[in-house]
């Protein structure tokens, strides 16, 4: 049984990405050549929608978990209004 190493995996992913990019570029060029702007518009709209969905469901705070269970206080509005920020103190 052949074992894959990390370099082979990266090379395979890079090749796959380059092939997908080339196929999509050729597809867009063909659609532009035949003046199918309506199809290009729909594809662009679907692409932006897919990107927004990926960003919306991604876990942006995964690397910011704190082990002590304390929540971080957000005093970002205090800086603009001249209020002295509370640094973890409660009344």
Image (tube, rainbow, N blue to C red):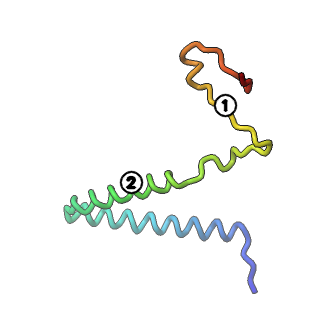
Work out which residue is located at the far right of the displayed protein and give it.
68
Q: What label does residue 34 carry, if any?
A: none
Give whichever of 21, 42 is nearer the camera. Answer: 42
- Mark 1 or 2, closer to the camera: 1
Residue 59 pos. (x, y %): 59, 52
**Left or right: 88, with 40 as reference point:** right
The part of the image, by quadrant, that contains residue 71 is: top right
| Vertical side of 19 occupied by 3: above or below | below
- The residue beneath circle 2 is 48
Disc 1 packing (10 Å; few <14; some 14–19; many ≥20): few
As helix, strand or loop, the secondary structure at mark 1 comes to: loop
| Residue at x 38% of width, y 54% of height | 48
**Left or right: 66, with 44 as reference point:** right
| Residue at x 75% of width, y 43% of height | 66
Work out which residue is located at the far left of the displayed protein and give it.
35
| Residue at x 62% of width, y 67% of height | 11
Dots 1, 2 in contact, CB < 8 A: no
- The residue beneath circle 1 is 73
**Left or right: 79, with 45 as reference point:** right
Check the picture and name the quadrant holding the N terminus: bottom right
How far apart, in angstroms, are the residues tagged by discs 1 and 2? Answer: 34 Å
Q: Earlier in the sequence, mark 1 or mark 2?
A: 2
As helix, strand or loop, the secondary structure at mark 2 comes to: helix
| Residue at x 43% of width, y 65% of height | 22
Residue 7 pos. (x, y %): 70, 67
Work out which residue is located at the far bottom of the displayed protein and give it.
1
């Amino acid at each position: 049984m052949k074992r894959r190493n990390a370099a082979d995996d990266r090379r395979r992913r890079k090749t796959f990405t380059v092939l997908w990019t080339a196929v999509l570029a050729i597809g867009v060029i063909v659609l532009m050549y035949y003046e199918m702007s309506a199809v290009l518009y729909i594809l662009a709209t679907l692409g932006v929608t897919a990107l927004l969905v990926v960003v919306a469901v991604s876990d942006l705070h995964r690397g910011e978990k704190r082990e002590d269970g304390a929540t971080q206080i957000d005093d970002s509005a205090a800086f603009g209004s001249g209020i002295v920020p509370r640094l973890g103190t409660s009344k």
